[in-house]
Image (tube, rainbow, N blue to C red):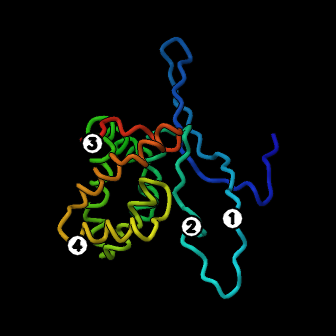
Amino acid sequence: MALPTGNDVELQRGSLSLPVDLGSGLKINIYCHTVIIERPHTAPIVPGNPSPPSSQPLRGIWVRTGGVLDFMRTLYQNILGRDPESHAVLEGSTREVYTRGLAYTVGRFFTSPEYTAKGLSTEATVDKFYLSVLGRHPEAEGRAHWIEEIRQGMTLWTVAEKFVGSDEYRRRVEADQAPDPIHWPQ
């Protein structure tokens, strides 16, 4: 089978685990790590005008068929800037979502020693919340709002709950653009 090529298609690594029962007590897992994602068309960049943040490529794009497991992969990429160490680590993060909820897991990424050691600015952290949870770059007003909330003492745990519990995230779940958080924040 030939894969489409050209400017409208790019290959993006995903992760999908498919359990198969072969009978006679023999079971295997099939792992798929490549899917096709259509690249959205963007307006040309005019010389002399800075390109908007939304024109930057998104490294960790969630693949719906990969479910929560693939969303965890995108959290590693978008928050920590790396892939998970192993499939087992990825599966552990996925289990955490099913037991504690997505907001807790997102909060854990942002409060992890690895993330805090990066010493990123509040602005960079807010940008990562938008990209990781809402799948987009922030608009100016929203960005300013969350920067101020964090500077006024809102914890990153609470920010995670607010993003995952937001109307925008709910709309993304309803449109199959984000996984169900399992436990909706109150």
Would residue 184 appear left or right of 47 to someone viewing this image? left
Residue 151 badge:
4
Q: Of helix, strand and loop, which one carries label 1?
A: loop
Who is closer to the viewer here, 23 or 2? 2
Who is closer to the viewer here, 128 or 60? 128
Asked if the residue under mark 1 is in contact with the one under mark 4, i.e. CB atoms within 8 Å, the reply is no
Q: Earlier in the sequence, mark 4 or mark 1?
A: 1
Asked if the residue under mark 1 is in contact with the one under mark 2, i.e. CB atoms within 8 Å, the reply is yes
Q: Which of marks 3 and 4 is nearer the N terminus?
A: 4
- The amino acid on which the numbered mark 1 sits, given as a three-letter code, is Thr
Name the residue located 40 percent from the left edge and 68 percent from the top edge.
141
Residue 185 badge:
3
Q: Vertical placement of 160 versus 46: above or below?
A: above
Q: Find the distance from the CA under tag 3 to the CA under tag 2.
A: 28 Å
Q: Find the distance from the CA under tag 2 to the CA under tag 1.
A: 9 Å
Q: Mark 1 points at which residue?
A: 42
